Image (spheres, rainbow, N blue to C red):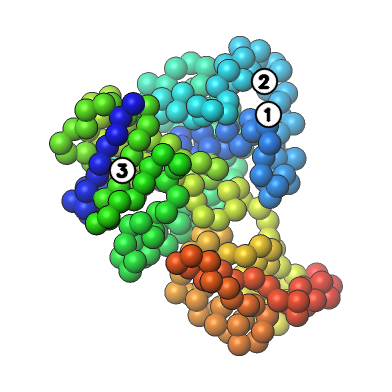
Amino acid sequence: MGHWLLGTESLTACRFAVSPVAETAAALGILAEIRPEPWRRSWLATHQPAFRAHLEAAPRLEAWLTARRPERWPADLHLPPPAPAPDPHRLDLTGIPAAPADLLDWTWQHVVRPEWPARLRTLRADITARRARAETHGWPVALPRLGPHHRWLAGGRLQLTAPELPAAQPPDVRLLFVPTSARLGWLAPDDAASRLAVVYPTCAAPVPTPRTPPTSLGRLLGSARAELLAGLDRPRDTAQLATLTGLSPAAVGDHLTVLLDARLVARARSGPAARFYRTALADALLTAQPG
């Protein structure tokens, strides 16, 4: 069990990266969940039948996966941290044992790669929103949910605790933040523990779910505002909406101001960020559209 303390110097030098392997591991974990979150159900209905058929045809893979969920997922995969500038379109399974590599390859080919443009847009939008929030409010506000055993301390220091961390912390750790659609994050140190990927869950709905607003509503409000209204099926903050729609946080804020003035959206404070939700007027407007 390692207890690492990362100071402001490490955080100042940190980088963000998109990892196809980490995102594929996240999708595999969602497919294998016993009690999935409610908003994942339509996505699971699309992909889970083929996934279960694949496991039934490969008992050794099913046995391997069953033995490792959910307590140690995905730490048992022993995924290496991605390169500082990984290829965002290639799945690199170098060094991963045969069983998890087979599962990851199947999940990439049949599930993640067909959705990759939408996923990549979501992950990159999340990175943009986190960077902006870190510059304005600091790292504890930008990345508040890194895991139940990790804590932000006074002075903006980050304490990480996990069994996959060596007991002795190296003096100079290169830190990489990696967004994924997983429910929870994990840590991925390299063999020398000189590089550490902190994998964290994105703040939007974890899997791409079509939220196409009615065409008539797009003509009335404009496509961006109609998409924002459709995305407010549950309360979300500006960063979540930016991640969900691919708009910049500034553009989301401008559109929300118009929707607030029109009383189609209301606002409530939740922690450091305001969360927005549709009003009854907006619900009635959406329901009344012919499509």
Label 1 element class? helix
Residue 28 found in image quarter: top right
Q: Which mark is nearer the camera, 3 or 1?
A: 3
Q: Are marks 3 and 1 in contact (CB under 8 Å)?
A: no
Left or right, 154 with respect to 254, comes to left
**Which of the image's four quarters has the N terminus?**
top left
Residue 55 bears which disc, if any?
2
Crowd rating for badge 1 (residues with CA inside 10 Å; few <14, some 14–19, many 20+): some
Label 3 element class? strand
Q: Which mark is nearer the camera, 2 or 3?
A: 3
Query: Furthest-left residue in view?
Result: 171
Q: Image height check: is 275 above or below 61?
A: below
Marks 2 and 3 sit apart, C-alpha to C-alpha, by: 38 Å
Can you give x and y, in whole percent of width and height, for residue 105 in the image? 53, 27
Q: Which residue is mark 3?
A: 159
Q: Which residue is mark 1?
A: 51
Q: Image height check: is 167 above or below 114?
A: above
Residue drawn at the location 41% of the way across and 39% of the way down: 149
N-terminal-most mark, 3 or 1: 1
Crowd rating for badge 2 (residues with CA inside 10 Å; few <14, some 14–19, many 20+): some
N-terminal-most mark, 2 or 3: 2
Looking at the rendered structure, the kind of residue marked 3 is: Gln
Can you give x and y, in whole percent of width and height, for residue 148 in the image? 45, 41
Residue drawn at the location 51% of the way across and 33% of the way down: 25
Residue drawn at the location 58% of the way across and 21% of the way down: 65
Q: Are marks 2 and 1 in contact (CB under 8 Å)?
A: yes
